[in-house]
Amino acid sequence: MRFYIFIRCKLGGSAKLIQETLHTVCGDCACSYQTVCLSIKEFNEGKESLSDCPRPGRPKSCVNEQIIASIKKDIDGDPHISVQELSDTNGLSYGTVHTIITEHLRMKKNVLSQVKSAINEQRPKFSTSRTLLLHDNAGPHQARATTKSLRELGIQVLPHPAYSPDLAPCDFWLFQILKDRLAGRKFARIQDLAKAVNSELRTILEEDYQGVFRKWHIRLKRCIESHGEYFEAL
């Protein structure tokens, strides 16, 4: 595996892509993302020995009850822990941890409950009863479990025309800001990227969001006036 990592590293492959490819071919026997990152770091430092180095964590040639119990214990201790953190802590590949969570433990991440808690904290007077949600009609957003949870939370979903990124604030404003601010930066781990994105989001002022909300209203009005046909960019 180290030889494969070496070749892909020289070709400019990312650690995430290399690990995913290894997991696709080798399954649970693939080295973890952490090990791939360590190997790439060593190669970049000139340590180009192709002998496999001892990998951190317990052997993961198979998924057993002890490993499953360890993952469950970590999740019970911190429900917000990420798959990558579980992978690093337990010395398992990302794919193996994901398989344990979804197939063995049959767990799903309930993001909506976290959203509800955040809304209740910031808007205790109204809670979710006066919350409107705009999403882009992606499959997971329209899944039966999602729509059921939204109804139970009392969140009203705003209709959104298909294939209309110009009417979604994230598409016509927020994503471009993040792209501009993060341009040229490289991240070895998803966690690092998430931290960088969250850091940038915190720097956006409240009045900026309010301004985009007003622009969104203008776009919606233009769409209605044009009866859904194309109109010049705003």
Image (cartoon, helix red, strand yellow):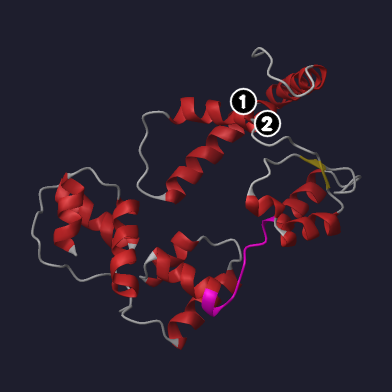
Q: Which residue is mark 2?
A: 168
Q: Is residue 44 left or right of residue 105?
A: left
Q: Amino acid at mark 2?
A: Ala
Residue 118 percent coordinates (x, y): 74, 49
In the rendered view, would you say 168 is above or below 87? above
- Would you say the residues marked 2 and 1 are in contact, meaning their CB atoms lie under 8 Å apart? yes
Quarter the N terminus occupies:
bottom left
Mark 1 crowdedness (10 Å alpha carbons): few <14, some 14-19, many ≥20: some
Quarter holding residue 176? top right
Q: Tell me the residue at 61%/30% (across/down).
A: 171
Q: Tell me the residue at 71%/52% (across/down).
A: 142
Residue 110 percent coordinates (x, y): 67, 61
Residue 29 percent coordinates (x, y): 29, 74
The verdict on residue 33 being magenta is no
- The residue range painted magenta reads 103-111
Quarter the C terminus occupies:
top right
Residue 146 percent coordinates (x, y): 73, 57
Quarter holding residue 34? bottom left
Q: Is residue 1 left or right of residue 114?
A: left
Give the main secondary structure, helix, strand or loop, of the magenta stretch: loop
Q: Amino acid at mark 1?
A: Phe
Q: Which mark is residue 10?
A: none
Camera sees residue 31: no
Q: Which residue is mark 1?
A: 172
Mark 2 crowdedness (10 Å alpha carbons): few <14, some 14-19, many ≥20: some
